[in-house]
Image: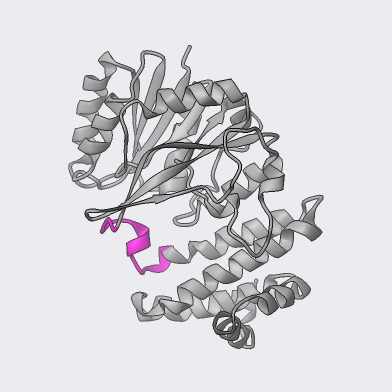
């Protein structure tokens, strides 16, 4: 029996993969399974992973899977989920790492609580700087209703802390179809996923275990690249709003979804200079169309609740004409 499956996608991270793999060894158990998914890397990553498959097999069960075509993080995670056999599942990105013994500790706490999933704090690492980032929820170590952790709309909540690797998940969620990601999303893939978890799972808990080290500022990361793939956040949040609008509590939850969508659009517009000029133009047109697709009464309330600078930027964009093709 595999107790825990750890799904780790890698893409062109030969500089960081050895640290990630060493930390997996420091978290290994005979009943743990490490699924190493190479998303068609073109550097030395595949060789590192093939070697790791052999070397880690003395401490855990290891599977190496390689994509022949790059599909992005969401698709790579789905490949890992399809291959996983564990009673519990979790994720790690191929350029991040773990504190020794973190997974056994987290698993023991989750088994004791008996909930569908847990969320955890993490350490953000930018060059030599370290900062602790906490799940934006005050109650810790107790079983909660995930739906109740979505609101309020005007504050950061658990759905805004969307990192898939900052937690652990029971297999029954995968059996219900709640753990797979929207295939092909290149960025913001965690957003529809975390919203679906909070709407449809039955129980969760927030734990203070600190053991994931999240590496920021990696040159190959999409958060550092101003190309068209960044615009997938539009598709991701369209999905959040669309699915939330169909929820039984849509009237209560939609203001949160729309306000968050607006905040993300404003964030990207505020740093638009990092995008290539054609992508910047596409960002403006797609964002204007997205504002027109939102429920307009909910959008009005969201803009009224935002600070003047962001609200003015979005209202100006809302008035921008868009083609029928872009609006669809």
Compare residues 44 and 102 and report the one nearer the observer.
Answer: 102
- Residue 324 position in % (x across, y down): 65, 79
Q: How many marks are shown on the rendered structure?
A: 0
**Residue located 47% across and 78% down the image:** 269
Dominant SS type (magenta):
loop
Q: In the figure, residue 240 lies in which quadrant? A: bottom right
In the depicted structure, whether residue 41 falls above or below residue 240: above
- Residue 128 position in % (x across, y down): 22, 53
Q: Is residue 178 visible?
A: yes
Bounds of the magenta segment: 217-229
Residue 222 falls within the magenta-colored stretch: yes
- Residue 285 position in % (x across, y down): 54, 79
Compare residues 306 and 30 and report the one nearer the observer.
Answer: 306
**Residue located 56% across and 61% down the image:** 235
Compare residues 218 and 26 and report the one nearer the observer.
Answer: 26
- Could you tell whether 251 is left or right of 314 in the image? right
Q: Is residue 192 visible?
A: no
- Could you tell whether 284 is left or right of 23 in the image? right
Q: In the figure, residue 303 lies in which quadrant? A: bottom right
Q: Quadrant of the C terminus?
A: bottom right
**Residue located 77% across and 54% down the image:** 246
In the depicted structure, whether residue 239 falls above or below residue 279: above
Residue 53 falls within the magenta-colored stretch: no
- Residue 200 position in % (x across, y down): 70, 40
Q: How is the image coloured?
A: one colour
In the depicted structure, whether residue 213 falls above or below residue 58: below
**Residue located 49% across and 32% down the image:** 81
């Amino acid at each position: 029996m595999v107790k825990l499956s750890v799904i780790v996608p890698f893409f062109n991270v030969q500089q960081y993969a050895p640290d990630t793999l060493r930390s997996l060894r420091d978290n290994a158990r005979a009943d743990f399974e490490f699924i190493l998914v190479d998303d068609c890397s073109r550097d030395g990553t595949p060789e590192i992973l093939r070697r790791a498959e052999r070397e880690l097999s003395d401490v855990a069960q290891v599977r190496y899977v390689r994509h022949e075509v790059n599909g992005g993080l969401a698709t790579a995670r789905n490949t890992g989920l399809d291959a996983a056999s564990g009673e519990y599942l979790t994720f790690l990105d191929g350029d991040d790492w773990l504190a020794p013994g973190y997974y056994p500790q987290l698993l023991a706490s989750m088994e004791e609580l008996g909930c569908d999933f847990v969320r955890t704090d993490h350490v953000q690492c930018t060059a030599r700087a370290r900062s602790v980032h906490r799940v934006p929820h005050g109650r810790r170590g107790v079983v909660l209703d995930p739906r109740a952790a979505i609101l309020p709309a005007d504050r950061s909540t658990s759905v805004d802390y969307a990192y898939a690797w900052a937690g652990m998940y029971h297999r029954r969620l995968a059996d219900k179809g709640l753990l797979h990601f929207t295939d092909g999303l290149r960025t913001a893939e965690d957003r529809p996923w975390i919203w679906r978890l909070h709407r449809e799972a039955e129980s969760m808990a927030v734990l203070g275990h600190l053991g994931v080290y999240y590496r920021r500022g990696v040159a190959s990361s999409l958060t550092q690249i101003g190309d068209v793939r960044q615009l997938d956040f539009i598709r991701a949040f369209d999905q959040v709003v669309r699915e939330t609008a169909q929820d039984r509590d849509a009237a209560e939850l939609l203001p949160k979804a729309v306000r968050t969508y607006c905040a993300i659009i404003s964030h990207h517009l505020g740093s638009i200079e990092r995008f290539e000029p054609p992508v910047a133009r596409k960002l403006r047109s797609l964002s204007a169309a997205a504002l027109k697709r939102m429920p307009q009464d909910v959008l009005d309330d969201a803009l009224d609740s935002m600070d003047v600078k962001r609200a003015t930027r979005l209202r100006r964009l809302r008035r921008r004409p868009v083609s029928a093709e872009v609006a669809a």
